[in-house]
Image: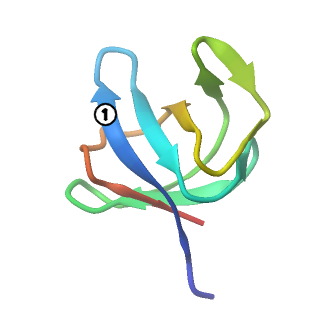
Amino acid sequence: MDKKPIGKIMHYFPKVGVAVVELSADMKVGDVVTIGGKSETFDQTIKSMQIEKTPLQVAKKGQAIGLKVDKPVKEGDIVWR
């Protein structure tokens, strides 16, 4: 099964473990994604995402969201589904 890129890491806040992701496709809580590129590549289930401190269940293509990540990421890393 081929994975398709659905977003790009624009910024990472290490103290809280949150990445800003610019989405190129819709994403929802419960999706399993792969994150990687410049940093370690890993799979995770989406548990929490927000826009300006408002929790989301579904994020739409074109939005920039805050995503709680399981491991450190770097700017430019890609999110695949």
Relative to 3, does residue 54 appear above or below in the rendering? Answer: above
Q: Residue furthest front?
A: 62
Where residue 61 sits in the image (x, y, percent)?
Answer: 64, 51
User: What residue did someone put label 1 on?
Assistant: 11
Amino acid at dot 1: His
Q: Answer with the quarter of the image where residue 51 lies.
A: top right
Q: Which corner quadrant holds the N terminus?
A: bottom right
Left or right of 66: which side holds 27? right
Relative to 67, does residue 77 appear above or below in the rendering? Answer: below
Where residue 49 sits in the image (x, y, percent)?
Answer: 63, 30
Q: Residue furthest top?
A: 53
Q: Secondary structure at mark 1?
A: strand
Where residue 68 sits in the image (x, y, percent)?
Answer: 52, 30
Relative to 41, does residue 66 appear above or below in the rendering? Answer: above
Q: Residue at x 56, y 77 (%)?
A: 3
Q: Residue at x 71, y 20 (%)?
A: 55
Q: Residue at x 68, y 14 (%)?
A: 54
Q: Residue furthest right?
A: 57
